[in-house]
């Protein structure tokens, strides 16, 4: 039977009264305390890691102070070693969910101790959360700050050299440089490194690298594109559909038309096998890309236009504008697709009457209709001969 603390004290007092026993306090239930000297040393060590005390005004003016919404309202600076320890830098970059969080890690940081993965991650987060300056507009203070950070990150990447970066990190750099339209002297050495190590790249890394090259317009990196054209066709089964669509679209922007179009032909067959899973957005990307490159594509275009005829009611007005412009410029002659697009536009006239883009649609549709009409007339003449 459990005996309470009060009962034990009462029992001890009774024994004391009866036998002259010395009353001692019951054994403490708390664990014994650590020696004072060890605790004091530990506290001193922890205090050594604490930030230097600052006034509120000093905190607000410090470049690494962040009090933006969602930042947790930081009221003290972290120790400087967070900005120089590669592991802690990586944690800070991956946790950042907005530009302010990325800038908090980058501003005032000593990049000389940063690893290649730190540099690649910083480029990726900076490109993801920052916007491109408006064309023709004067850069604001934030734009100038980001430009300076880009310069510093590029300098650190140059110091490390391409051999320090993994294939995934090199792909990340191309992807981020593409998003930021950042052209520099690093492109050549990193392109050479990517070409010589392309077998080590996984499908996502190849797709992201080609995507970045497309945004940068790196047509002159033909040796890297040639190596992609040699290696990717036999590996295409490893790629996800989105990766293939992204590569197709990027190669179209690069006007990629090699003497042997094995890569484009293989990608065309890949798309045909999955045509029912594309949807309007992917269909449009493939049509745009196919219209901009030169390879045997009659079968692919026929399949694409037939699928568009079936799904045209799911296209937005903007997608229809882009579709008819691309097909008119490439002189696509497909009767079923042209008829379906025309009927869809006519069914939306009440919606499009107030849309300034209607004239663009109608002009390009007329070109497509004339092309189909001429093709039909030519075929009739050939039959009569």
Image: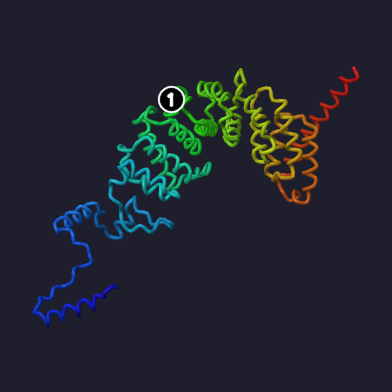
Color style of the picture: rainbow
- Foreground pick, 364 / 102: 102
The correct choice, above or below, for 222 with respect to 87 in the image is above
- Residue 280: image quadrant is top right
- Foreground pick, 118 / 43: 43
- Residue 38: image quadrant is bottom left
- Residue occupying image coordinates x 44% and y 43%: 126
Picture quarter with the N terminus: bottom left
- Which residue is situated farthest in the right direction here? 384
Q: Is residue 264 left or right of residue 140?
A: right
Residue 36 placement (x, y as % from top left): 15, 59
- Residue occupying image coordinates x 22% and y 65%: 30
- Residue occupying image coordinates x 52% and y 34%: 204
What element does badge 1 sit on? helix
The correct choice, above or below, for 351 with respect to 323 in the image is below
Q: Which residue is mark 1?
A: 193
Residue 354 placement (x, y as % from top left): 73, 51
Q: Is residue 333 left or right of residue 111?
A: right
Residue 70 placement (x, y as % from top left): 43, 57
Q: Is residue 49 left or right of residue 100?
A: left
Q: How many C-alpha atoms fall within 10 Å of the one at disc 1: few (<14), some, or many (≥20)?
A: some
- Residue 129 visible in the picture: yes
Query: How many dots with numbers?
Result: 1
Residue 22 placement (x, y as % from top left): 10, 76
- Residue 220 visible in the picture: no
- Which residue is situated farthest in the left direction here? 20
Picture quarter with the C terminus: top right
- Foreground pick, 20 / 210: 20
- Foreground pick, 1 / 254: 1
- Residue 365: image quadrant is top right
């Amino acid at each position: 039977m459990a005996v309470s603390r009060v009962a034990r004290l009462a029992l001890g007092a009774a024994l004391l009264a009866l036998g002259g026993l010395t009353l001692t306090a019951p054994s403490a239930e708390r664990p014994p305390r650590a020696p004072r000297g060890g605790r004091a040393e530990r506290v001193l060590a922890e205090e050594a890691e604490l930030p230097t005390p600052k006034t509120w005004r000093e905190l607000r003016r410090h470049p690494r102070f962040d009090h933006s919404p969602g930042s947790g309202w930081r009221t003290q600076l972290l120790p400087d070693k967070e900005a120089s320890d590669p592991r802690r830098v990586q944690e800070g970059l991956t946790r950042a969910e907005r530009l302010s969080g990325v800038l908090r890690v980058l501003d005032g940081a000593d990049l000389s101790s940063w690893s290649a993965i730190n540099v690649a991650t910083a480029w990726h987060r900076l490109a993801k959360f920052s916007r491109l300056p408006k064309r023709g507009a004067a850069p604001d203070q934030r734009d100038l700050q980001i430009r300076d950070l880009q310069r510093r990150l590029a300098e650190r990447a140059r110091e490390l050299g391409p051999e320090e970066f993994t294939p995934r990190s090199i792909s990340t750099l191309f992807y981020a440089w593409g998003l930021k339209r950042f052209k520099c002297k690093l492109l050549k050495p990193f392109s050479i490194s990517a070409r010589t190590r392309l077998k080590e790249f996984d499908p996502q890394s190849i797709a992201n690298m080609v995507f970045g090259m497309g945004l940068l317009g790196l047509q002159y990196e033909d040796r890297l594109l040639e190596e992609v054209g040699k290696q990717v066709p036999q590996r295409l089964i490893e790629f996800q559909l989105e990766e293939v669509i992204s590569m197709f679209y990027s190669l179209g922007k690069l006007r990629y038309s090699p003497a042997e179009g094995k890569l484009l032909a293989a990608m065309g067959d890949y798309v045909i096998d999955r045509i029912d899973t594309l949807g309007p957005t992917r269909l449009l990307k493939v049509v745009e890309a196919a219209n901009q490159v030169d390879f045997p594509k009659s079968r692919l275009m026929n399949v694409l236009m037939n699928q568009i005829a079936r799904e045209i009611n799911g296209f937005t007005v903007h997608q229809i504008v882009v579709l008819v412009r691309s097909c008119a410029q490439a002189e696509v002659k497909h009767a079923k697709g042209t008829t379906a697009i025309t009927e869809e536009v006519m069914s939306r006239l009440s919606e499009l009457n107030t849309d300034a883009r209607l004239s663009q649609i109608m002009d390009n549709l007329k070109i497509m209709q004339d092309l189909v009409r001429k093709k039909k007339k030519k075929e009739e003449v050939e039959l009569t001969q």
